[in-house]
Image (spheres, rainbow, N blue to C red):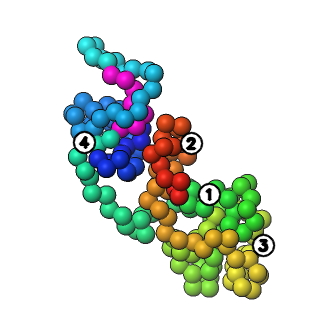
Amino acid sequence: MLVLNATYEPINVCTVRRAAVLLLKEKAEIIEHSSFELRSENAAIPRPVVIRLVTFVKVPRDTHRRKITRRAVFARDGWTCQYCGSRANLTVDHVIPRSKGGDSTWDNIVASCAPCNRRKGDSLPQKVGMHPRHPPRVPHPQVFIHVASPTIPAAWKQWLPEAA
């Protein structure tokens, strides 16, 4: 389930169970629902697909501190190699290799296909003429929704910015 803040900004993804609890406690309302129902012994509610929190929740925007995972790097980079554009056999690459003093930070890690990663090896980008198509950067917070749910349901698309 996609969770929207009170301002209709997407902030998270949750399970159906968590969404049901938020709805039953009246902390959220259903914005989009499927044709199925959630049933208990004496109640039935539409199965939520998108819910909105009733009160505003301040969301920390310190994505630079979020854990760097392969899936997050791939999602940020559009699931494509930043050197050749391939979508197959992805790995992560340190633009400035760790052996040359490069850090494991959002600004130094990109998605790379295995052949490009092997070709670049532990060389600096200038030495081998391999520069990322897009400079690595701290991801937009919406990237983490794509990491939590790599396949985005159609009902979510109107709520997610295209930049994610």
- Left/right of residue 123 with respect to residue 52 in the rendered view: right
Q: Amino acid at mark 4?
A: Val
Labels 3, 1: front one = 1
Where, by quadrant of the figure, is residue 37 drawn? top left
The mark that comes first in sequence, 3 or 2, is 3
Query: Does any portion of residue 104 appear in the rendered image?
Result: no
**Marks 4/3: CA–CA distance:** 52 Å
Name the residue tied to disc 1. 78
**Marks 2/1: CA–CA distance:** 13 Å
Q: Position of residue 83 (x, y in %)?
A: 72, 69
Name the residue tied to disc 3. 119
Q: Residue at x 29, y 47 (%)?
A: 6
The mark that comes first in sequence, 3 or 1, is 1
State which region is magenta: 45-51
Name the residue tied to disc 2. 151
**Marks 3/1: CA–CA distance:** 21 Å
Name the residue tied to disc 4. 54
